[in-house]
Structure formats: C-alpha cells, structure tokens
Image (spheres, grey):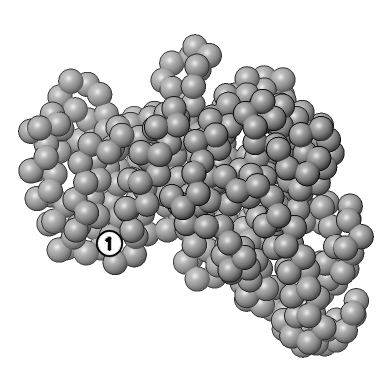
Amino acid sequence: MSHLHSPAPAPAVASGFQPPAWADAARQTAFHAWLARISPAHGLRPDSVRVASADASFRRYLRIDTAAGATRIIMDAPPAHENCAPFVQVAKLMHAAGLHVPEVLDWDEAQGFMLLTDLGTRTVLEAIDTTRPDAAQPLYRLAVADLVAWQRASRPGVLPPYDAALLQRELQLFPDWYLARHRGVAVQGALQDTLAQTFALIVQRNLAAPQVYVHRDFMPRNLMLPPGDAPPARLGVLDFQDAVHGPATYDIASLMRDAFHSWDEEFVIDITVRYWEQARKAGLMDFEDWHSDFGSFWRAVEWMGLQRHLKVAGIFARLTLRDGKPKYLADAPRFLAYIRHTAARYRELTPLLHLLDQVEGAQPATGWAFGRVYM
C-alpha cells in the first residue's frame, strides 16, 4: 500500500538548487536522455532540475523551469516498484469531475518518467493553524466542494473496489506492524481473537455504506493552494493514484481526522455537517436515515475513520521499521488517540479499547488473556 505519500512540491532552496541524486547510474542516464528528448517541445531548462519532494514510497518529484519562466513537475517512479497507469487514469477522472489536478504533459511509461503541470509549492496543511478554525474554514469549504464533485462523478466498475479483502488487508497492518513489530506484542490467542472479531465488525459496518469514488488520502497535505496571497477560488488535488470505489464516508473521515494535525471535535463536526448538507443535495445521502439524520451519518464516519486510523498506525510503523523513515511514527500517538476516542463511544468496541489500554502500558508481551498481558 502506498498511502500518505505527500508529494506536495516544496520550494527550491534560495541559495541554489538541490539536484537529484541517483543511486542507479543506468536510470540516471535514461532520465537525462528522456529529458533531452522532451525539453524542446515543452521549453524546459534541463539545468534547472531540482528536488521538489520525496514520497513515502519509491516515487519522488522534481521541479524544472521553463524558458518562459513557468515551472513543471517531473515524477520519477521506477516501474519495478511503481505503476503510473492508475495516476493517469484517476487524473483524467478527476479532471472530468471538475477538480484541479496535474495535467500529464508527457509520460515515458516504460521508464516511469512523467512531466506534469505544477500546482504550486504551498499545501493547505502549511496554511492552516489548528488554533484558528475560523480562518481555516474557507479552505475546508473548498475541499468539501471538491469532494462532493468527485463523489458525484462516481460510476461502478471504473476504479478497483474497496472491498472486504482490501479493508481487511489494511487493518492487518496494525497487528503485523504496530503491535508485533513496533510494540513487541505477541499477536496470538485471545488477543488475536479480539482483533479478528473487531476487524470483522469494522469491515461489515463500512461495507454497508454507499459506494463512491474514494481518493484515499484526501487531506490538507495533498491539497494545494494557488500562487499569490488572494483567497483561492479552488484547490489543487494531489496523491490520488490509489483511488478506489468504496465507502462514501472514507474521504471526509480522512479530511477531518488528519494524519499530521488534529482539530477540536467542534470544528470536525462543523465541517462534516457542511459536507453532509452538500452531499444530501447531490443525492449522496440516500441511504437508510442518513438523509434526515446527521447523527446516523456521523456514526458511520467514525467507524470508517477507525479503520483508517488502525491502518495508518500500522503504515507508520512499517515506514519506520522497514523503510527507515522514523518521522512518520512520531505521529502514531495521534492515531492511537483517534482510535481510543472512537472505541470509547461504542459498546461493541470495548474489547478493542481494553486491548489498547493493556498494549500501550505493557512491555513486550508473550501472551494475552482478556484484559491481562502475561509476560
């Protein structure tokens, strides 16, 4: 899985460019040959290539200037590790839905090099201050409008299904990587049974939701502001290559329970209500009593958020332990707090809450027996 890439371009260092480093000399040669071939048609300046951002995956992004004074983004995605076809497909779908996404100007599919339009250097995450929700509200309203437009364009059979198998595989990241590898807990016996029963319930609840297009990382770090200081009329959308067809609750949950910052629940509910109202008008809430009862929809969002939070805690542990990127795991306590918050609200999730209470206060465990960790 390749979530939380955050390919948001970063500004070049003022004192000079940071040229890309290449671990593979053959790939470096292929890159320069591709760049030399496309530069005349696109007015590119090959001497200006510099690092824009790195991914949580094998994908990275470079920035390059044009002779006319504009900039473009280059995606470097080694084909042995990354498949760019979904990016191209979803970019077309989002553009057709009216979203502002990068335009693919050139794609060397065999080599995994892509030239894109540049949506800017500043993310919504950089512009918001969680102590000033009123100032952030206009940006979140723009994000909600984009989300509803994206969901309204949904058609079944176009994107991969966010089915039970995928939801379960994502949940399994939590015991495999966060509990076993990071916390040193032996996931077996009663503990394993508790997780299996809880995960089955989470999957069942979430699959009951209406199915729409799902970005899967629709959060401020992947939303871009246009250049300048004027209030934006629209946001740019990035990191959409893992889009699927799945629960309508997913993207609003990821937007409001973010991986890298937390809002007070009052603001979370306020924006979620605004989304719900727009989604109702778009016919996206015609399910059970969602159309008339925000509380019913809100409960579904919480169950969806729980799945995401468990998954992301596992992903962050994997990024640290397998991929050598420890900065991600520093945000794991945020996700544990989200999980606890939701588990404490629902009686069916009490076993999960007790499990977390024991694990987070325990040393590496060798056994589990309903509320007690045996050393």
Q: Which residue corresponds to the image point at 71% horizontal and 55% vertical from the top-left?
A: 208
The residue at which mark 1 appears reads as 79
Picture coordinates of residue 292, whole percent (x, y)? 81, 32
Q: Is residue 353 above or below residue 65?
A: below
In this orientation, does residue 271 appear? no
Q: Which residue corresponds to the image point at 45% horizontal and 45% vertical from the top-left?
A: 240
Count numbered badges in the picture: 1
Looking at the image, which is closer to me, 277 or 20? 277
Picture coordinates of residue 144, whole percent (x, y)? 61, 29
Q: Which residue corresponds to the image point at 50% horizontal and 16% vertical from the top-left?
A: 233
Looking at the image, which is closer to me, 66 or 353? 353
Horizontal side of residue 329 vs 355, given as left or right: left
Q: Quadrant of the C terminus?
A: bottom right
Horizontal side of residue 126 vs 313, given as left or right: left
Callout 1 environment at 10 Å: few (<14), some (14 to 19), or many (20+)? Answer: some
In this orientation, does residue 367 appear? yes
Q: Is residue 362 above or below residue 275?
A: below
Looking at the image, which is closer to me, 233 or 20? 233
Q: Is residue 262 above or below residue 369?
A: above
Picture coordinates of residue 40, whole percent (x, y)? 7, 33
Horizontal side of residue 270 vs 1, given as left or right: right
**Amino acid tagged 1:** Pro
Looking at the image, which is closer to me, 131 or 58? 58
Residue 284 occupies quadrant: top right
Q: Is residue 4 above or below residue 322?
A: above
Picture coordinates of residue 115, whole percent (x, y)? 24, 40
Q: Secondary structure at mark 1?
A: loop
